[in-house]
């Protein structure tokens, strides 16, 4: 095989490993300050604890590259996971969460009816999450080229990428070959970990999964939605979107671990 610009995982010919996380817990309730914005939300105490716990799980991983989406909650999660490692954290803003449109005026009934099952609607790629937001196709077309540029970049063997629930759903659906229609099949809890192995090959200039001198020849999912503080998901019965409806429209349920 033609030499590739990275060191493969031991015992493999051309394999690298992606550690894909969702950021730690944040409080999505309507901010009391009109100047507050969802993009600036910090991690809660629980979110920081989730990130530190994941740092313990991954303490022996020899990360040589790390990226986040440019938002405080993804950058802070990555910082807590990496701890004292001296690794540059690269912001990739095109990996931000789906732009949902305006949902603040929705009634609770409408939120429960439409918001909870929103990603299942990706089977209609030209549908939006809410009026004024991105379509699912636009979301996919924004995220996937940015992700593939990271996936095919030279120099790394173990990468940490901290992103968002919707962003991760796109990447996981791509990795298992389901495409856009498959993004509603995944759950991504706060602070969760997914592990994806990528077998690389020399780049095909005409290939859709090529960037620079390499392409992804094959992707393999090793782990999905792992939470070190609750690996069996005991009591974790709501989806993230179902919990967000409760957060935004009422008192936060701190027992929903």
Image: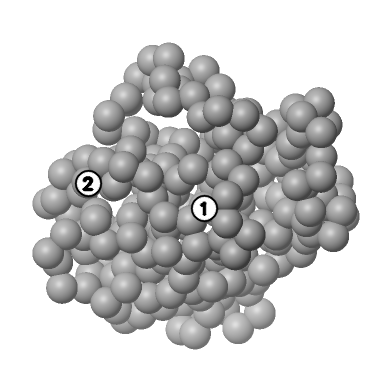
Identify the disc placed on residue 164.
1
Q: Residue furthest top?
A: 235
The residue positioned 77% from the left and 29% from the top of the image is 108
Question: Would you say the residues marked 1 and 2 are in contact, meaning their CB atoms lie under 8 Å apart?
Answer: no
Identify the disc placed on residue 52.
2
| Secondary structure category for the residue under label 2 | helix
Q: Quadrant of residue 126?
A: bottom right
Residue 147 x/y as whole percent:
52, 67
Q: Where 1 falls versus 192 (above or below)?
A: below
| Secondary structure category for the residue under label 1 | loop
Q: In screen coordinates, is 152 left or right of 8? A: right
**Color scheme of the displayed model:** one colour
Q: Where 185 falls versus 104 (above or below)?
A: above
The crowding category of the residue bearing disc 2, from other C-alpha atoms within 10 Å (few below 14, some 14 to 19, many at least 20), is many
Residue 209 x/y as whole percent:
58, 69
The residue positioned 58% from the left and 71% from the top of the image is 94
Which quadrant: the N terminus?
A: bottom left
Residue 91 x/y as whole percent:
43, 74
Q: Where 151 falls versus 166 (above or below)?
A: below
Q: Tell me if I can see residue 211 in this picture.
A: yes
Q: In screen coordinates, is 90 left or right of 39? A: left
Q: Where 117 falls versus 56 (above or below)?
A: above
């Amino acid at each position: 095989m033609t030499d590739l610009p990275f060191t493969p995982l031991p015992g493999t010919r051309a394999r690298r490993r992606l550690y894909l996380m969702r950021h730690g817990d944040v409080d999505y309730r309507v901010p009391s300050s009109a100047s507050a914005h969802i993009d600036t939300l910090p991690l809660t105490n629980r979110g920081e604890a989730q990130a530190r716990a994941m740092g313990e799980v991954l303490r022996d991983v020899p990360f040589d590259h790390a990226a986040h989406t440019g938002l405080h909650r993804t950058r802070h999660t990555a910082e807590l996971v990496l701890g004292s490692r001296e690794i540059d954290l690269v912001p990739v803003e095109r990996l931000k969460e789906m732009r949902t449109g305006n949902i603040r005026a929705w009634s609770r009934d409408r939120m429960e009816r439409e918001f909870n099952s929103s990603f299942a609607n990706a089977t209609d790629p030209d549908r939006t999450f809410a009026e004024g937001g991105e379509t699912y196709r636009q979301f996919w077309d924004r995220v996937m080229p940015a992700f593939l540029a990271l996936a095919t970049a030279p120099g790394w063997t173990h990468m940490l990428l901290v992103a968002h629930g919707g962003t991760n759903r796109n990447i996981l659906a791509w990795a298992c070959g389901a495409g856009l229609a498959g993004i509603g099949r995944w759950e991504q809890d706060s602070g969760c970990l997914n592990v994806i192995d990528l077998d690389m090959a020399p780049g095909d200039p005409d290939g859709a999964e090529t960037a620079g001198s390499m392409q992804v020849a094959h992707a393999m999912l090793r782990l999905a939605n792992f939470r070190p503080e609750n690996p069996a998901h005991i009591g974790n019965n709501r989806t993230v979107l179902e919990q967000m409806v409760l957060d935004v429209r009422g008192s936060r349920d701190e027992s929903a671990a």
